[in-house]
Amino acid sequence: MNILLTGAFGNIGSYVLAELLRREHTVRCLTLDTPADRRRAAQFPQLTDVRWADITDADAVEAAVDGMDVVAHFAALIPPGSEANPELARAVNVDGTANVIAACQAQSVAPRLIFASTFDVHGDTLHKTPPRQIDDPLEALDDYSAHKIECEAMVRTSGLECFVPRFVDVPVIGLRKAEPIMFEIGLANRIEVLHPLDAAVAVANALDVDAVWGRTLFIGGGEQCQVTYREFLTRIMGAMGLQLPPDGAFADKPYATDWVDTAESQQLLRYQQRDFDAITADIAALLGVRRYLMPVVRPFVQRSMLKMSPYWAG
């Protein structure tokens, strides 16, 4: 199958790319020409077709879509970058998606379209009894979620054969830097996670499951990946040899996270293979010999992290 993958070297996209190649699909990638993406592309020596272009370039997008059976659209500017630069975020997220849709419509035989969305489109739901259902109301809480809501509507009215997976939180399997946004989520918030390998399996399996086309489905880790934000951070940071910052460093407010009903998507796509322990184990494995340095550097890392919190007065 000929597949165009946008955002091919992002957190989810890179795993989707690897899974598609493993299944011997012919994959063309559309991505920005950056040093980081050049390095990531080099990790896929079997990849022979990369279009180094901007999703906001309508001509480049149309050329990339030509001849494809499926377009998997994962390119997006996400928080905190989307909130720091809303004009750029709209150009990438909304105008870029419009370019993808138009390019698909322009083909003599329109490809199927997978549009990657997010649970964030449901807004603050923590006052409701979980799990969330796919037909729950939509509520934009920031530019990013507003863009996704707008794009979902564009996709549904495009006349294309589409599948819209709404992903829960997909943690980076890596030793990532702390960001101030981590302190904006209340520790009591419910959060569901999904291993990126399982996200990739869901996308790849969807190519062969007719029942998902024309549908919007939650893609999440299931009950074995449903935790509170306190537990999520404690275990993720613990895997990196760090400790949870004091409660006073965190906002005491709801955030766009929750547990979701994935019974139907799991029945159709059979992708939930890894629990939260697998996520933390994979992160911990990346420490390698650095785990022996953590007792020395931990106090400095912890203090640096606390300085990012706008709520910490200690």
Image (cartoon, rainbow, N blue to C red):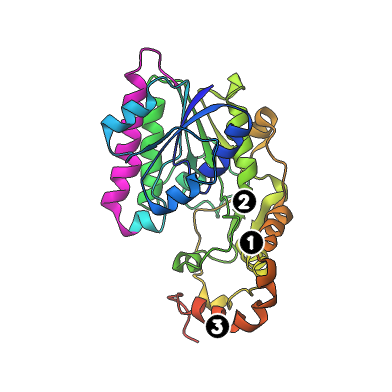
Task: Check residue 274 for magenta coloring.
Answer: no
Residue 57 vs residue 120: left or right?
left
Residue farthest bottom in this picture: 314
Q: Is residue 147 above or below residue 291?
A: above
Task: Check residue 98 for magenta coloring.
Answer: yes
Q: Is residue 76 above or below residue 249?
A: above
Residue at the disc numbered 2: 193
Q: Earlier in the sequence, mark 2 or mark 1?
A: 2
Q: Marks 1 and 3, how far apart in space? A: 22 Å
Identify the disc placed on residue 76: none
Identify the disc placed on residue 232: 1
Q: Position of residue 64 (x, y in %)?
A: 37, 29
The residue under label 3 is which amino acid type? Phe
Tell me the element at label 2. loop
Residue 95 vs residue 130: left or right?
left
Tell me the element at label 1. helix
Q: 155 or 299: nearer the eye?
A: 299
* Stretch in magenta: 84-111
Tell me the element at label 3. helix
Q: Residue at x 51, y 66 (%)?
A: 177
Q: Position of residue 224 (x, y in %)?
A: 73, 49
Q: Position of residue 70 (x, y in %)?
A: 48, 24
Which quarter of the figure is the N terminus placed in? Answer: top right
> Picture quarter containing residue 269?
top right
Q: Give the number of marks.
A: 3
Mark 1 Cα within 10 Å, few/some/many (few <14, many 20+)? many
Q: Earlier in the sequence, mark 1 or mark 3?
A: 1
- Residue 10 appears anywhere in the view: no
The residue under label 2 is which amino acid type? Val
Q: Residue at x 50, y 65 (%)?
A: 182
Residue at the disc numbered 3: 300
